[in-house]
Amino acid sequence: LKQEEGTKLMLKMIPERERKTVGAIVQYLETGQISSNKRLAEVNEIVAKMSAVPTIVCDTMGLVLGFSQAAEEVFGWTEKETLKKNVKMFMPEEYAKYHDYYLARYRRTGVKRIIGSSRNAKAIRKDATVFPVNVTVREIRQGKKSIYIGLLTDITLDIETE
């Protein structure tokens, strides 16, 4: 991606191993003349529809804006059931009880803890099954607005083979 006419890029490069799964968004976004709200909505739609990896898009308050088909298959919820709900619905209580605080701290301080990195955690399916995942979180900024893109990989088999 390159910068044009001094405008900032909305999307930082995604690491090579994730680029293959998120596909089109890597090439998608050079800034243009459309509004930031429209641009964020377009990125959200691309991520949610094209990702082969379970992908959850949320706003800065943690409300789900997009839920990929791969996420539907892994978690058991439909996108319609998740939209505008808090993303902590995908976390067991041990993680969920702190998540709103973590988001508020990031909004207040700007200090990144998981954004831009990956870590192993636990997730919860609609049927209440808890399973291990690797979570990668990316932030897309446009002016003062941001969305977060969470890419999740079920690592159950990796753990079982260790």
Image (tube, helix red, strand yellow):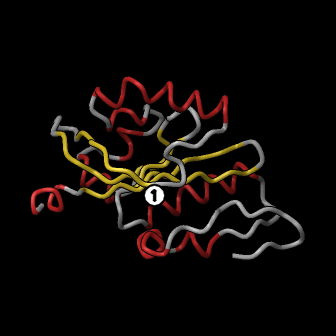
Closest to the observer, 90 or 120: 120
The residue drawn where x is 60% and y is 68% is 13
> How packed is label 1: few (under 14 Cα within 10 Å), some, or many (20 or more)?
many
How many labels were placed on the picture? 1
Residue 31: percent from left, percent from top: 76, 65
* Residue sitting farthest toward the front: 162
* Residue 40 drawn above or below residue 4: above
**Left or right of residue 29, residue 76 in this image:** left
**Left or right of residue 75, residue 108 in this image:** right
Residue 87: percent from left, percent from top: 42, 36
**Left or right of residue 93, residue 103 in this image:** right
The residue drawn where x is 84% and y is 64% is 7
Residue 161 occupies quadrant? bottom left
* Residue sitting farthest toward the right: 5
Q: Quadrant of the C terminus?
A: bottom left
- For label 1, the SS is helix
**Left or right of residue 145, residue 77 in this image:** left
Q: Quadrant of the N terminus?
A: bottom right
The residue drawn where x is 54% and y is 48% is 148
The residue drawn where x is 55% and y is 55% is 44
- Amino acid on which the number 1 mark rests in the picture: Ala
Closest to the observer, 139 or 55: 139
Q: Which residue is mark 1?
A: 48
* Residue sitting farthest toward the left: 161
Residue 3: percent from left, percent from top: 79, 72
Residue 90 occupies quadrant? top left
